[in-house]
Structure formats: C-alpha cells, structure tokens
Image: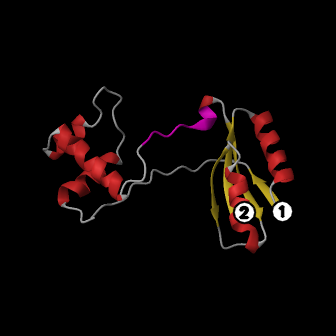
C-alpha cells in the first residue's frame, strides 16, 4: 500500500493516547483537517492492508491483580514448531517467539494470581516438550513508550 501524507498522519495519531470519550477519533480527525468518517475509513484501509496490526488498549496486568512472568525455554531445534503449538494451547500464554539462542523459545504467561501462574508453569513443565525452562519474573519494570516515527 502506498501511503500518502494523510495516511502517515493517521498512523501518527493512532499511536497517541486516545481520549476516553464517545468519539475518540474525532479530535485526531480535527487536528488533521479531515472528517471523522474519512479518518475512520483510512484507519480501516490501514488495518486491511496490514500497516496497522491492532488497535487496542494496554492494561497493566499487575495493577489489576494479575500475575505474569517471562519464560525462556530450550527446545530441540526440530521441535520448535511443535513446542510453539503446545504453548499456544495454554490460555495464559499471551505470545511466544523464537530466538537464536540456546533458549530458543521465549513466552509470557499471565494468570489471575500467583497460585494460578505457578500451576500453569508446572503444567507447561510437565506437558510441553523441552530440555530446560527458565522462569524470569519481573524484578523491576523499565517501560518505554514506543512510537514509530512515520516519514
């Protein structure tokens, strides 16, 4: 998809914090000098083209009472696809990705509390094919606000 200047501005706008109002895209459209309908049409096209993968909110899971961790898992290279599928079957596994490292699959788990998190990790330990697994809980969070500079 060829992006024009307004598409680029739309991409910049959707990376901002949206107001909690009945029409959250209206202020962005007004800043760009286009109608709300045109703004939403462009967002829909950007989603359809894949330029926007997802629009959504971010919840701080710890602040709403959930427990989470990052896990590094060592799987046999020929089993990576199978192991990823096994991990995907766990409701609490939010995402996983392959890395070029001895621990070649990394994933996050979020559960309703510490007890459920421990239970899920124990089930993964028993049910997922792997050689070793490291639980890497957050000790201190360094959060950055990633926004892409659209040129």
The image quadrant of residue 96 is bottom right
Residue, disc 2 = 82
Q: Could you say where residue 145 lies in the image, as x and y percent from the top left?
A: 45, 50
Q: Residue furthest right?
A: 126
The answer to whether residue 103 shows anywhere in this view is: no
The image quadrant of residue 62 is top right
For the C terminus, the image quarter is bottom left
Q: Residues within 10 Å of mark 1 (few under 14, many from 20)?
A: few
Q: Could you say where residue 79 lies in the image, as x and y percent from the top left?
A: 75, 68
In the image: residue 69, left or right of residue 2: right
Residue 49 or residue 150, whichever sits in front: 49
Q: Majority secondary structure of the magenta segment?
A: loop
Q: Which residues are magenta?
A: 56-63
Report if residue 57 lies within the magenta region.
Answer: yes
Q: Residue at x 71, y 46 (%)?
A: 90
Colouring: secondary structure
Q: Could you say where residue 8 lies in the image, as x and y percent from the top left?
A: 25, 57
Q: Residue furthest top?
A: 22
Q: Is residue 129 above or below residue 114?
A: below
Report if residue 42 lies within the magenta region.
Answer: no
Q: Earlier in the sequence, mark 2 or mark 1?
A: 2
In the image: residue 53, left or right of residue 122: left
The image quadrant of residue 37 is top left
Residue, disc 1 = 132
For the N terminus, the image quarter is bottom left
Q: Residue at x 76, y 61 (%)?
A: 73
């Amino acid at each position: 998809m060829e992006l024009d200047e307004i598409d680029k501005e739309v991409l910049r706008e959707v990376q901002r914090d949206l107001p909690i109002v009945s029409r959250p895209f209206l202020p962005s459209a007004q800043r760009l000098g286009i109608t709300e309908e045109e703004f939403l049409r462009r967002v829909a096209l950007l989603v359809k083209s894949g330029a926007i993968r997802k629009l959504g909110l971010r919840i701080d899971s710890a602040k709403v009472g959930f427990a989470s961790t990052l896990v590094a898992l060592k799987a046999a290279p020929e089993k990576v696809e199978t192991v990823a599928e096994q991990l995907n079957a766990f409701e609490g596994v939010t995402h996983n990705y392959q890395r070029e490292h001895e621990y070649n699959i990394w994933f996050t788990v979020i559960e309703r509390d510490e007890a459920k998190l421990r239970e899920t990790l124990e089930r993964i330990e028993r049910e997922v094919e792997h050689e070793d697994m490291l639980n890497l809980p957050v000790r201190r969070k360094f959060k950055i606000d990633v926004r892409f500079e659209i040129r």
